[in-house]
Amino acid sequence: MARNREGQRLELLPGRGEWFTFYENLIRQDYLRGLRALNEGDRVIDIGANIGAFTVLAASKVGRTGSVFAFEPDPATCERLRANVRLNALENVIVENCAVGAAAGEATFYRHSKNAYSSLMDGVDGRVQEHLESFPVLVMGIRDVIAKAGPAIKLLKIDCEGSEYDIVDALDAGSAGPVQQISMEVHPVAGRSAEALQARIESWGMRVTFTNLLMAIRN
């Protein structure tokens, strides 16, 4: 078990790269850098919640009157997400065992030995056919996700190994209107452009900075 200075805890498995997941989320708090702070009562969406590192951090910050909506498609990883939520005695987290995409439906999920690499795409970051197995998962459309979490969403966090392009493409200024901030990993995917993704988010009236993460704040 790993614990940060604030007392937030995660159960980690060895040899899967999970220590770095803990470190970047609960020690460095990468997904919150340069953004407006999360406060009591805020609502947060966590797409690609994995074992719950960011979910636990966000839920601890938004308090009992806030909510975190956490989405994780892998059933085994989702059970560990739920366990880490219970470990931290958090009652403000809504966990959904599904992926998030452009529209509702079903998709093939590719499970990797390092669960942070698991994806709806085979070939993200050059990892072609490196998955252990694949199986179908349910997908919730991003517009439905925003409607479920609204009316005001303080932060939309996305780390979904290449599916971010489809998610962003499915939104426009109106449907993205409830989202005040975005923190997102952007992965190299053949035929997709990070510059075009950034331009689309800017067209919603958001100011974008792009370092190791794409961070957007509504103007």
Image: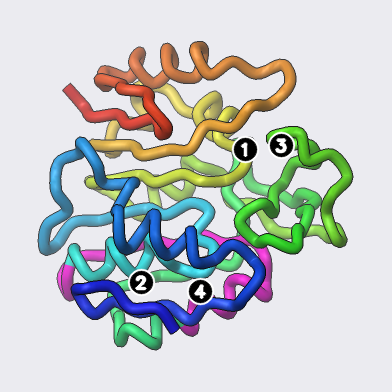
Alpha carbon separation for disc pair 2 and 1? 23 Å
What is the number of the mark on residue 81? Answer: 4
Mark 4 touches mark 3? (CB < 8 Å) = no
Horizontal and vertical percent position of residue 140 = 58, 51
Mark 4, other Cα within 10 Å: few <14 / some 14–19 / many ≥20: many
Q: Considering only vertical position in the picture, is 92 above or below 101?
A: below
Q: Considering only vertical position in the picture, is 126 above or below 205?
A: below
Q: Looking at the image, tell me whether mark 1 or mark 3 is earlier in sequence order.
A: 3
Q: Looking at the image, tell me whether mark 3 or mark 2 is earlier in sequence order.
A: 2
Which residue is the extreme one toward the front? 15
Q: Is residue 73 magenta?
A: yes
Alpha carbon separation for disc pair 1 and 3? 10 Å
In this orientation, which residue lies closer to the viewer: 125 or 177?
125
Q: Which residue is mark 2?
A: 93
For mark 3, give the secondary structure.
helix
Q: Which residue is mark 1?
A: 163
Q: Which residues are magenta?
A: 63-83
At label 4, which amino acid type do we have? Answer: Leu
Q: Quadrant of residue 213?
A: top left
Mark 2, other Cα within 10 Å: few <14 / some 14–19 / many ≥20: many
